Image (cartoon, helix red, strand yellow):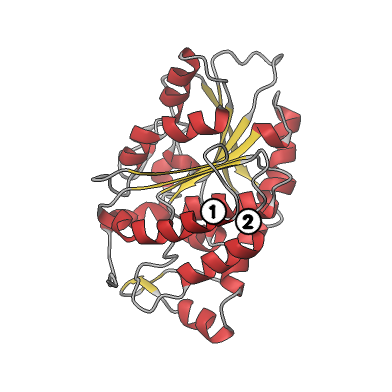
Amino acid sequence: MLIKRITITFLACIVTYAAIGQAVPKTANGTIKRHAMFSSKNVDARNIDVWLPASYDGKKNFPVLYMHDGQMLFDSTTTWNKQEWGVDETLHALAQLGFKEIIVVGVWNSGSNRHIDYFPQKAFELLSEKTRDSLYKAERNKGNPVFHGKVQSDKYLQFLVKELKPFIDSTYKTLSDVPNTFIAGASMGGLISMYAYCEYPNVFGGAACLSTHWPGIFQMENNPIPNAFINYLEKFLPKPSNRKIYFDYGNATLDALYPPLQQQVDQLLSKKGYTGKQWLTLAFPGEDHSEKAWNKRLHIPIQFLLQ
């Protein structure tokens, strides 16, 4: 059954780069170092919030997790919807259980360009020019376009890999190799995490993709995008080897679109030889599309990546 156009008011999160989120987050555990308006030759400048565990002393080296939508990760008092991922609390609790401590690099989205930064470019380019042109006219709601410009996620990944990561590795005590470098996000952030995992297997050893937005836009009727993602994964999904990828989804609000699409992705992963050691997909019935929901289950993908 095709699910028709959905308008979700809380998707205002794409504009979270407004002044409401400018304060440096306060954390319950660890500390945050802000690199304000980090410049790039590839994409818009944006804040980078680096969370350091309490044990960070500049001597020991730590794995690194890069996370998208960085303004939503740590402090609900600075976010547009008063919700947060609770990253610092989650990682502190896992450390108390004996899991590795890690550094988290919170990469802010740039507001209106979030969609064109996060939409997997090579998948988009598998579509016909006519289809691409029609998608550029898609609206989130009346008068509010989905795409504020041309898809540029290849440039966004170049920013992460060629500009930001070298800076992080030279500024902080990191374990910079593939098995200790991870990437994570939700919704469109889940898509770009999947894309980074596929495009840069020599950089990212694991990805966590929560509530991955397989529709790409905000309607399902006559939507060619999910098939384009499947075709992309068919061509570019790395061999499993020692890497890890995690997916999940709820079934409320926007997440109601995801179960049948994720099942198609799961079938492909199985076909490509991924097993429980390299891949995990979980369903969370009743959970919606929000930071509150992702907060409740963040410990699961983190444990999976760090095991």
Q: Which residue in the structure is indicated by mark 1?
A: 269
Whole-percent x and y of residue 235?
Answer: 65, 64
Residue type at mark 2 is: Leu
> Residue 5: image x %, image y %?
29, 71
Image check: 209 left or right of 76? right
State the residue at coordinates (42%, 46%). 19
Query: Which of the marked residues, 2 or 1, is nearer the chain's N terminus?
Result: 2
Residue located at (36% from left, 61% from top): 260
The reply to whether the C-beta atoms of the residues labelled 2 and 1 are less than 8 Å apart is yes
Q: Give the left or right position of residue 247, taking residue 202 as reference.
A: left
In the image, 134 versus 113, the foreground residue is 134
- Say if residue 147 shows up in the picture: no
Name the residue tied to disc 2.
Answer: 237
Residue beneath the point at 51% across and 32% down: 304
Q: On the picture, is 178 further left or further right than 303?
A: right
Q: Using the numbered discs, state the Cα–Cα distance from disc 2 to disc 1 in whole angstroms.
A: 8 Å
Q: In the drawing, does residue 301 fall left or right of residue 297?
A: right
Placement of the N terminus among the 4 image quadrants: bottom left
